[in-house]
């Protein structure tokens, strides 16, 4: 990060980093407390940390979509992230395009539940290790985990790290000046 005013991308990464640290600290505190006794507040604390991760990822990708749609190349697009995915594929960046596609589908599932995006992710033959999708008939990711929340995507530390990595790569792909606030003074 630069010494001047941060770019919008840098602010997103700082916020993601802070939220991740907060969620991990809460999880460590609650797991430590549960080693000496079971208390509902610590189980709920673990669940809060998981929901915090979901909110953080959904929010970060929502912000990304808004920022991409504001760029000249994507103005007026009804699906700016899909247009960006298409552009990445045309430029020979198929791996990044596929990872962005996976995260757009995963975020859609987190927001809307079962549907086409969920079916797409369930049908992936080469599902990456960070992507754990609850099946149509699965009640749990880990049976007996009382801290589990009822999402169709397991937004654990590996998922958050992979999502943050994709966000970082996408920000590097698009015009960096589009991510700056109008106020000058940003150093690069």
Image (cartoon, helix red, strand yellow):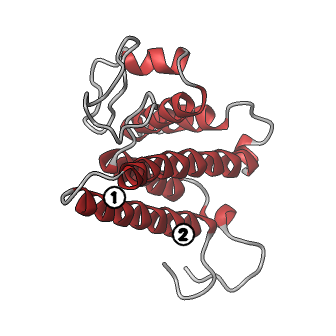
The picture places residue 55, in percent across and down from the top left corner, at: 55, 48
- Is disc 1 placed on a helix, strand or loop? helix
Between residues 6 and 140, which one lies in front from this camera angle? Answer: 140
Q: Residue at x 52, y 82 (%)?
A: 2
For this orientation, the residue located farthest to the right is 76
The picture places residue 14, in percent across and down from the top left corner, at: 50, 70
Alpha carbon of mark 2 to alpha carbon of mark 1: how far?
A: 26 Å
Between residues 178 and 30, which one lies in front from this camera angle? Answer: 30
User: Alpha-carbon neighbours of circle 2 within 10 Å: few (<14), some, or many (≥20)?
Assistant: some
**Disc marking residue 184:** none
In this view, 125 is above or below 170: above
The picture places residue 96, in percent across and down from the top left corner, at: 41, 41
The picture places residue 83, in percent across and down from the top left corner, at: 62, 33
Q: Residue 8: which quarter of the image? A: bottom right
Q: Are marks 2 and 1 in contact (CB under 8 Å)?
A: no
Between residues 37 and 113, which one lies in front from this camera angle? Answer: 37
Left or right: 94, with 112 as reference point: left
Residue identified by numbered label 2: 10
N-terminal of the pair, mark 2 or mark 1, is: 2
Residue identified by numbered label 1: 27
- Is disc 2 placed on a helix, strand or loop? helix
Left or right: 136, with 181 as reference point: left
Q: Which quarter of the rendering shows the C terminus?
A: bottom right
Q: Residue at x 50, y 39 (%)?
A: 88
């Amino acid at each position: 990060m630069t010494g001047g005013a941060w770019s919008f991308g840098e602010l997103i990464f700082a916020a993601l980093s802070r939220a991740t640290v907060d969620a991990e600290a809460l999880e460590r505190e609650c797991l430590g407390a549960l080693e000496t006794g079971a208390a509902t507040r610590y189980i709920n604390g673990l669940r809060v940390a998981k929901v915090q991760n979901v909110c953080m990822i959904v929010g970060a990708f929502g912000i990304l979509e808004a920022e991409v749609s504001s760029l000249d190349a994507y103005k007026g697009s009804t699906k700016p992230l899909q247009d960006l995915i298409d552009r990445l594929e045309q430029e020979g960046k198929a791996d990044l395009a596929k990872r962005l596609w996976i995260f757009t589908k995963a975020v859609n599932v987190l927001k809307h539940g079962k549907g086409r995006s969920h079916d797409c992710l369930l049908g992936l033959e080469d599902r990456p290790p960070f992507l754990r999708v609850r099946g149509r008939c699965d009640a749990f990711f880990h049976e007996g985990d009382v801290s589990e929340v009822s999402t169709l995507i397991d937004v654990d530390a590996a998922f958050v790290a992979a999502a943050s990595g994709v966000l970082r790569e996408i920000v590097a792909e698009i015009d960096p000046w589009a991510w700056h606030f109008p106020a000058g003074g940003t150093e690069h």
